[in-house]
Image (cartoon, rainbow, N blue to C red):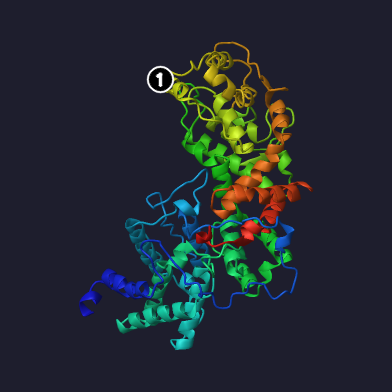
Amino acid sequence: MSEVSSQPWSRHLYLLAAVAAAGTMSCSGQISRSPESSHDGVSRGDDGEGDTVRPDEWPPGVDPGTKGVHRLNAAEYNATVADVLGTKLAPANASWLGGQLGLFDNIAAVLNVDEDQFKRYLQAANQIADDVFGANNLKANLLICSGEDAACVQSIIANMGLRLFRRPLQVAEAATFNTLYSAARAQGETRDGGLKYVLRGVLSSADFLFRIETDLDAASAEKHPLNAYELASRLSYFLWSSAPDEALLAAAADGSLLKQETLLKTVDRMLNDPAKSSRFVENFGGQWLGVRQVPQHAVDVKTFPDWSEPLATSLSKEMYMFFAEFVTGDRSWLDFLRADVNFVDASVAKLYGGQSGGSTAMQRIEIRDDQRFGFAGLGGFLAMTSQDQRTSPTKRGSWILTHLLCTEPPPPPPAVAKAIAESQGFDPTKNVRATLEEHRTNPGCAACHASFDPYGLSLEQFDAIGKYRTAYADGSKIDVSAKMEDTEFSGLSGLVETVTNDPKFSECLPEFLLNYALGRPIVESDRPYLYAIHKEWIQETPSIRRLVGTLVSSEPFRYRRAAASR
């Protein structure tokens, strides 16, 4: 042991090996929990007292689904250590193993761990522990008592485990970390030095790195409710991309979170937290609405000299702020394409044809006499759904069909796909509508494109960076009329009313939101639940806040079944 202790990093690995041997760490990510294990002090709300959310309020006999252990993605890891420990370090970066399924990067099935990733976790745990114990203000938040007696040390470890495991430590876990502390002290560490090793061990443990939900009977196909701590974690990572705060943990401890009234009040409180709810805007909205793509969107600056990295950044900020207006307020989702609101700084105002001024701050404005309104009128959306030298009615239309109406267009036939790949593209100076009509004379293209091109054609008065125009570069007048089956419409206003009045528009948001909230793909057994969620939500003002409350009250969010049962 003396040879090991001569190297601080080797000693760190040696001490952590004690934790691994006790089963609280995993290099492979394949974690199993014994059927009889349970969290000490967990209230399941099954005492029949209080106004608990009743499963019979939702479709009977329907499978609420399941998923495996859910590793924290990079954004969740950084937010968790920041909120719980106060560190400004953000060790999770692009080199960390990640994955995306569909639109989202928080899907459990693709968040795996390999040996290199686990090494990154060990390195991050070391860096974070050094940072926390190197700053008195951060250390003071973690060390809730000052003595060296066993009772004080155990209370610190219990508090550390509660906040980072997002539930009370089990008896065996507490004993393991106390053993780690004692081993560090035996190696000559001070009290704080021993607790620093405990923090490293906790940050390297599977129950920190993964969100683990237990099934007491792994062979049972019966649905069962999440316990209060598991529900608190689902809620906090859904809306904050981070661990439950003290108020959420307290509501889990006394079981009140399992009551409908407390659950809905908690949703309001969480959405009213501007700093933390902004993560929901950025992580859900940023992926679903494509905002993350805008700063990296390729634009030919010779064709569009107004485009610049600062402008792209400002346009993405506007998209986030526009979406945030619907998240934090009570505005109807049916106004998303209608709201005549913009958020501009000098560069965005110039693009939109207003007074540029010199403001670098984003300002909320409402201008009623221009040609721009709603999400589809935002420069960021119009740019990211365009090519680098010209607009793309096909890209704009298919985006609307996929993201706002939850309808996936069929892939082009192989021969058509090959022709597209071999084509030199459209001349950006020519009339896009006329060129697109030539393309659609191909029978293999026409039927498919008819389902989404009209949406994009109605937006042709906005160029490839979102600037309003009335003619193409070749001088030809822009025609924004469109026809889809028996529906005719024209321009942005016609598009907005056509899409908003489509029943799929209000049905689509709950589907994407449930996908993100659960961290798993939507499956067929979710459809009855989605129908019930939509029916409940649409009866009154369909705000995002009400939708979140309806969704977290539903069985798919509050229940699960064993993964191996079907």
- In the rendered image of this protein, does residue 75 appear above or below residue 489? below
Task: Report the front residue among 362 and 144.
Answer: 144
**Count of marks overlaid on the render:** 1
Image check: 138 left or right of 329? left
Image check: 480 left or right of 50? left
Q: Quadrant of residue 132?
A: bottom left
* Whole-percent x, y for residue 404 in the image: 63, 37
Q: Quadrant of residue 340?
A: top right
From this viewpoint, which residue is outermost toward the left?
Answer: 3
* Whole-percent x, y for residue 117 in the image: 36, 57
Image check: 39 left or right of 324? left
Query: Does residue 348 appear anywhere in the picture?
Result: no
- Check disc 1 and give the amino acid type: Glu
Image check: 32 left or right of 391? left
Question: Tag 1, which secondary structure?
Answer: helix
Q: Quadrant of the N terminus?
A: bottom left
* Whole-percent x, y for residue 345 in the image: 60, 38
* Whole-percent x, y for residue 422 in the image: 40, 20
Q: Which residue is mark 1?
A: 422
Residue visible at 35% across and 74% down? 21
Disc 1 residue crowd, few under 14, some 14–19, many 20+, Cα 10 Å: few
From this viewpoint, which residue is outermost toward the bottom?
Answer: 149
Task: Report the front residue among 467 and 223.
Answer: 223
Residue visible at 32% across and 75% down? 15
Task: Report the front residue among 234 and 417.
Answer: 417
Residue visible at 62% across and 62% down? 559
- In the rendered image of this protein, does residue 385 appear above or below residue 207? above
